Amino acid sequence: MRTRTPFSLLALGAVLWVAPTADAALPTFKDKTIVVGKSIAGVKLGAGLASGKAAWGKANGDCSDPFLCLFRVKGAVSGDKGEGLFSVKKGKITRIQITAPLASGEGHAFKAPFTTPKTAKGIGIGSTEAKLKKAYPKATSPSKGYFVIKSPGRIETSFVVDQSSKRVSSVVVEIIPAD
């Protein structure tokens, strides 16, 4: 009996298999801004693949279209040392994400380079949940520790708050696909 494996599972498996063996380092984030609904550290929604590569440098793995460009320290597994990524579909960047590394105990560690990008209101990885709520009072919270700012054109900026420290541990800017 033959079963089909969805493409997304194959792609994820390829990323997890390739990334730990690649030799690229974390991005340096020359641009240290998060623009809600638009970009993270110089990688912009809707920009081409070459633009994303120019902003963050050499990625782990394939980094082609349709796929994602993944940035992890050599030997890192599943973002245990933090990661940055951007997804590419039909030649355009559709999702950008940065995630803080895991701490030795519970939760996340808040260290560079992931703590450097900030919004115009000073919010980024490591910011407290209280400061996030004060800076973006209209952000919705569909679930505990998850805050979303909606922008025109099915674009969302999400902040994930680590529940043990109550600090932002991940930031995502993405185009939400139509159903």
Image: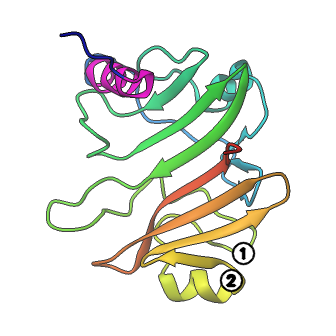
Residue 14 in the image: above or below residue 147: above
Q: Amino acid at mark 1?
A: Lys
Instruction: Give percent across and percent down for residue 168.
Output: 46, 70
Residue 178 in the image: above or below residue 161: above
Instruction: Identify the image's colour scheme: rainbow, by chain, secondary structure or one colour.
Output: rainbow
* Residue, disc 1: 121
- Left or right of 152 on screen, residue 59: left
Q: Amino acid at mark 2?
A: Ala
Q: Residue furthest front?
A: 1
Q: Kindly report the secondary structure that dominates the magenta region of the rendered protein.
A: helix
Which residue occupies the foreground of this view, 33 or 94?
94
Q: Quadrant of residue 35?
A: bottom right
* Residue, disc 2: 135
Residue neighbourhood size for the residue with mark 1, other residues' Cα within 10 Å, grouped as few (<14), some (14–19), many (≥20): few
18 in the magenta segment: yes
Q: CA distance from mark 1 to mark 2?
A: 6 Å
**On the rendered image, what quadrant is the N terminus found in?**
top left
- Left or right of 5 on screen, residue 138: right
Q: Residue at x 85, y 58 (%)?
A: 152
Q: Which residues are magenta?
A: 6-19
Give SS at disc 2: helix
**On the rendered image, what quadrant is the C terminus found in?**
top right
Q: Are marks 1 and 2 in contact (CB under 8 Å)?
A: yes
Instruction: Give percent across and percent down for residue 66.
Output: 59, 18
Instruction: Give percent across and percent down for residue 7.
Output: 43, 21
Q: Residue at x 49, y 82 (%)?
A: 129
Q: Earlier in the sequence, mark 1 or mark 2?
A: 1
Instruction: Give percent across and percent down for residue 142.
Output: 53, 75
Give SS at disc 1: loop
Residue 127 in the image: above or below residue 7: below
- Left or right of 111 on screen, residue 52: right
